[in-house]
Amino acid sequence: MSRSLTFIMYFLAIFLQAGAYGLTFMLPRLFAEFGASEKVVGAMLFVTAIVTIVTVYFSGHISDQFGRVRALGIACLAIALSLFLYGYVNAVGLGLLVASISLGFGWGLTYSLGPIVLTRLVNPEERVRFFTLLSIFVMAGFGLSPVFASVLAGFGYPVQTVFYLTSFLCVISAILFFLMIKPIKVHALNPAPEPSSRITLSALRQVLKSRALLPVIMVCLGASVFAGMNNFQTVFADARGLNYATFFFVYTITVVFFRLVLVKFKGGNNPYLTISMLQYAMAASVVLFIVSGASIPLYITVAILFGLGYGTSYPMLVAMAANDAQPDLGPQTLQIFALTYFIGIFGFPLLAGFGIVEFGHTQVLWFLAILALIEASIALRRALSEV
């Protein structure tokens, strides 16, 4: 298998399994069919968060045992199982619990090991470009799966259908990863065996004392804002008489467009300044959403600003984490980066779901705006310190 074909298959496999996370945005609608509230959605995603965090912590142990690419294939099979169970069960109980656990295990491995595999194939100066490409395929899967669900609903199919179809796509993704085990070894820049990826207490302490601590903290804040806006977008849209598919479609197109445009952009002379400006745009999008009401043009503007702000700054932040890492702790740093990301992605919905039920949508959205402003200000402070 040629190097180019290996990259094509790799990114295709990433895209096919990425739709799984996008379907978590549909859980409020899926759960509503059997009478479960946003609190139950938050609780199930909190279970997913706990399992994801544990999985990310031990992902190095798992990859050392099975190999990173094989572990990615196993993870995709776990995600396929979780989506099938989400579509199959019709009540709160053991089935949903197993589905949430399987999703946490699978997504924890794919998200933490995916960038590490990529670092074996590209030079350090290429990381921003290839991490951007990686994030394009991830975001395309994220954003298009809810749109796919809306299209199927328009043809009269129940929401469970998209869970079954995406489960099948995850099986195909697993097969692709298994087929790439040998080609990735052949095309690795360093043909030596993979160094250990295990996170030890010593490695954890070193990462938290390094310059990489800042992007590790920032990604958690950004992921919380992302989760709050996306996981409950169906709820926000329904309350205003809007179509949630509009947000996801515009957001996805915006992210893919700007990431393609900026695929060779390395953040300029001061990447953290660029990141901070983009994240202030993200904060502005949340504030605009609060005051936009049922206006469709403003709803589209919110999606564009959020896609530009969060979607474009995220791959730069991944690259900063990799570049700020100590040379001998690159894999561990990226895994800890992924760990804090998942704390925000799957942990914050528990807080948001409770807040929506107890205090209302607006209060939760203001909290998201504050988190976005904090993250942007942290990036600005680092940028000014490096001038």
Image (cartoon, rainbow, N blue to C red):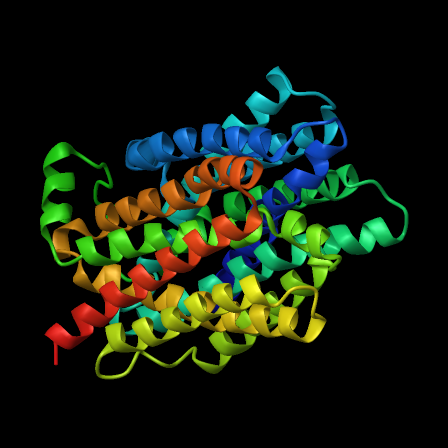
- Residue 287 appears in the rendering: yes
Q: Is residue 193 left or right of residue 160?
A: left
Residue drawn 16% across the image and 40% down it: 204
Q: Quadrant of residue 309?
A: bottom left
Relative to residue 373, is residue 361 drawn left or right?
A: right
Q: Residue 244: where, in percent of width, then height?
A: 69, 57
Q: Of residues 360 and 61, which is closer to you in this image?
A: 360
Q: Residue at x 17, y 57 (%)?
A: 325
Q: Residue furthest right?
A: 156
Give whichever of 305, 152 is nearer the camera. 305
Q: Position of residue 135 (x, y in %)?
A: 46, 62
Q: Is residue 223 left or right of residue 250?
A: left
Quadrant position of residue 343: top left
In the depicted structure, whether residue 52 falls above or below residue 364 = above
Nearest the camera: 348 or 321? 348
Q: Is residue 34 above or below residue 225?
A: above
Q: Residue furthest top?
A: 94
Q: Residue, x 71% and y 21% (percent of image)?
A: 91
169 up-or-down from 265: above or below: above
Percent position (x, y) of residue 239?
Answer: 70, 51
Residue at horizontal 75 percent and vertical 50 percent from the top: 149
Locate the C terminus by quadrant: bottom left
Does residue 188 appear in this view?
Answer: no
Give percent across and percent down for residue 179.
Answer: 53, 47
- Tag count in the figure? 0
Q: Nearer the viewer, residue 104 or 16?
A: 104
Relative to residue 87, is residue 179 depicted above or below?
Answer: below
